[in-house]
Image: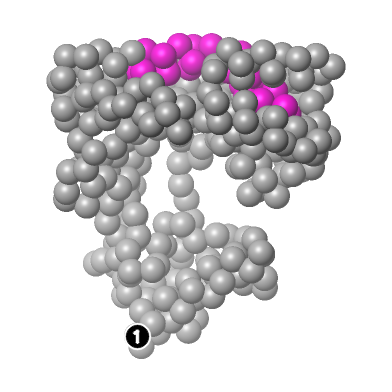
Amino acid sequence: MRDWRRCNAIIKKLEAMKVRTHAGRLRYDIKYWGAGMTGRWSGAGGVNVQNLSGKNLYGVNMRDMLVAAPGHVLIAADLAQIEPRVACWLAGETEALAQMAAGVSPYTVYARQAMGLGANEEWAKSDTRYKIAKMSVLGASYCAGHHRFMELLRSSGMEEVLSGGPEHEDTEEEYVKYIEMVGRPEWIKKWREADELEKKWLMRSWEIIMTFRNGRPQLVGLWKQLGEAAKKSAEKGEDLILNLPAGRALTYKHCRFRRIPKTEGGGQEVVAEIVRGGKAETTRIHQGILIENLCQSIARDAFRDCLLGVTNAGWKVRSEEHTSELQSRF
């Protein structure tokens, strides 16, 4: 099923590119403020030239479908792993940032911090341990819980990581204590109704998440600060404002508490008004959303500054005025 969906997605992208190709030139749209509060760039109209895969999938390489006009060269470049780097900067993970500045991958840095990798050692990218480190950094930095992380691993084709079960003998006992302490009825119900294989998945994903949180205590501390800030704003019925280094701010209007139905665990949650698509809408505000919005907003602003720097240096960044230099193979 997953392969069919990926193949269908590729077909749709190729069809969108073909429709937008005229006289050998590809016409496309870019939104310079495309993602709600964070302002991330985004594509439009079915073609996002900023997110074309360079891998061969089912005999198709999306980037190879585009060629430069005579006398020009196309260069694919981005800001490598910028969001996990920003997360470490926000949390004050100075040691991790120093290693990254020296050229060490954020995933290797994390493996050295929390997974037992030696200070001067590295795992190959094909190593399962490296893949777990990468998924941990990408999936857990935004406060993902073990249920969500389990689904991320499965959707990424890494079920073998889960199927082996927990690495430690006392994990089952500790896991049961954890879900009973948290007291979420849906978690307890899921555990009791799970078969042997699913219990292995739950325990292993929980181990990985707890390893991440124990390995990045300053980041976890930042999550808690953000969560507390949201609650304080809700108690006062005021806006939550998070200032960004570039001078703008993320504003969550009219924070307040909303009751959670008993069928979903009960209790209360913080909600606020945010603007999406030019319209205000009520959405849940929690520490995971806040850290994600902060990281993506700062990354967006850094990307903007880099684009301006590249342009000022005389390079042409792909934009509407330069589409005449971007040819299509269609």
> Is residue 152 found left or right of 275 in the rendered image?
right
Q: Quadrant of residue 192?
A: top right
Residue 159: x %, y % from top left: 74, 44
Residue beneath disc 1: 22
- Considering every residue shown, the one lying at the far front of the view is 262
Q: Magenta stretch: residue 267 in it? A: no
**Is residue 97 among what the camera can see?**
yes
**Is residue 290 among what the camera can see?**
no
Q: Secondary structure at mark 1?
A: strand
Quadrant of the drawing holding the N terminus: bottom right
Residue beneath the point at 41% across and 25% down: 266
Q: Is residue 211 above or below residue 1?
A: above
Residue beneath the point at 45% across and 11% down: 221
Residue 311: x %, y % from top left: 29, 50
Q: In the rendered structure, which segment of residues is drawn in magenta?
A: 203-227
Q: Residues within 10 Å of mark 1 (few under 14, many from 20)?
A: few
Q: Nearer the viewer, residue 321 or 265?
A: 265
Q: Is residue 290 above or below residue 63?
A: above
Q: Nearer the viewer, residue 76 or 263?
A: 263
